[in-house]
Image (cartoon, helix red, strand yellow):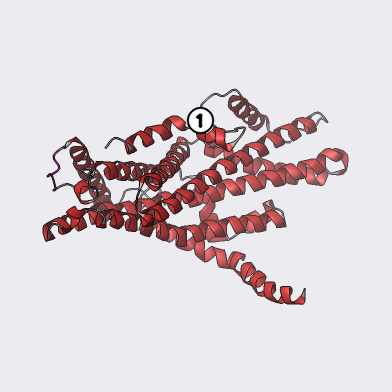
Amino acid sequence: MKLVKSLTDPLVKMLDRQLSPESLRPKVRRLEKMGKITKTCVLGYAQKGRMGRLNHTLHTLSHIWFIVVVARSIRLLLFDDPNETIYLGDFFSQTKGKEFLHFLIIVYYLLFFASRAGAHISEARKPMLMLKFYGKIEKHGFDSMCRLLTPTKFKNFRIVLYSALQFYFIGIPIIALSLFVLCITFALQTSTFYLSIYHSIWFVFWVIIITGPLALNIYSLFWFYTHFISLITYCSMSLGCAYDLGGIIQSDVGKHLDLLADYLKRQNKILNLIRSINCDIGPTAFVGYIIATFLANFSLFLAIFVTSESNAMKIICFGLAIIAYTNLTLLHFAGTVVHERLMEIRERNFSIQARGVNLIPLPMAVWINSTLERIENGENGISVTHIFVMRQSSFLFFVLENSGILMMFVSNFVKS
């Protein structure tokens, strides 16, 4: 036992240091700085008004570049001449490049749309609450979280936040490098690449044109994803604390008048946060894009893994497919937990109301009831709750429900 303790104590101390607020705050500042560098939140993030000349120029060039890539890709898809070597596809695939280009177009377009959606969301009139949420951590630390969460949940949240930040700072570069290696693997397996220096130059040119901006879009996409999953986790834990405190009050309302104010403060604050997110169409659109992106990535890399004859390509694609599936699973279950917490609080609130105590203001109670009833009735709406926090009997059913989208992508893999 002493040996085990001597081995584990340094690890525990190191983990505690990494999870300390003093250690996490610089990482949050770094995340915010990277968000500004990659232009994921130009104009709307700081809400300072018009874009600068440089930012406006880069913004315009990105749209022009997008149109050029789309036009060339469409033209390639329409060509049947195997000697048409001026376009990207013939440098990657023996089948005129169309099969690989289908892969590339699907992944790139979805990542592009998701990141652009995230950028335009931040340009809304009011700043997104998730950005306020991180800004508060950056400036004021974790004081409010420490008050709203129990010690155990506060530590769990810091673990989630630390994991999300490490994934962004370490995992995303690995993913970007894997995608680049995947492109190189495709290129080295085709004889067209070795025909002449001219062919090699064209290949390098197109790789830079496509993978460069694509890498920035991947960083943009996961910048918003890191914010969103942390905020949802915080909402879930705060709701759980409010629910637990409600159980104490429910035991005997008369003996816990001092807890009523605390319960009211905790519960209404977090419910207001969730309701404000639901009322903004921006996060709804972004969550829809990010779910579609993970679905597309999973089906894409799995299809390449199954059909490829290259062992290197199989290893890379299988790893990327696991990452996409893991993130999709995380999104689903995080949303499910938030939904369950809302259901529990509604039931607990009804029970407390029966004792003649109104803890939740009437407008908030009406919103909770109507939102959950619409979900239970299967109605669709424009809120994060309807798209993200869908209550399903199992994750398999959740994937099958999106099989129409998934099969649309898979059908592109066999067109060549």
**Residue occupying image coordinates x 71% and y 57%:** 151
Judged left or right of residue 383, residue 81 is: left
Position in image of residue 264 (x %, y %) = 72, 41
Residue at 46%, 59% (x, y): give it. 171
State which quarter of the image contains the N terminus: bottom right
**Depth check, front residue: 279 or 286:** 286
Q: Is residue 36 left or right of residue 338?
A: left
Name the spot of residue 24 as percent of width and height, x first: 56, 64
Whole-percent x, y for residue 67 in the image? 22, 42
Left or right position of 405 against 204: right
Residue 410 visible to an observer of this rendering = yes
Q: Is residue 357 above or below residue 217?
A: above
* Residue 123 appears in view: no
Q: Is residue 314 magenta?
A: no
Residue 58 appears left or right of 329 = left
Are there few (<14), some (14-19), or many (20+) residues within 10 Å of tag 1?
Answer: few
Looking at the rendered structure, the kind of residue marked 1 is Glu
Residue for point 64% across, 54% down:
145
Read off the residue under disc 1.
401
Counting labels gives 1
Q: What secondary structure prevails in the magenta region?
A: loop
Q: Residue at x 20, y 51 (%)?
A: 91
Q: In what quadrant of the picture does the C terminus appear? A: top left
**Where are the magenta residues, as a range?**
81-85
Question: Where 172 sits versus 355, above or below?
Answer: below
Residue with the most extreme front position = 309
- Helix, strand or loop under label 1: helix
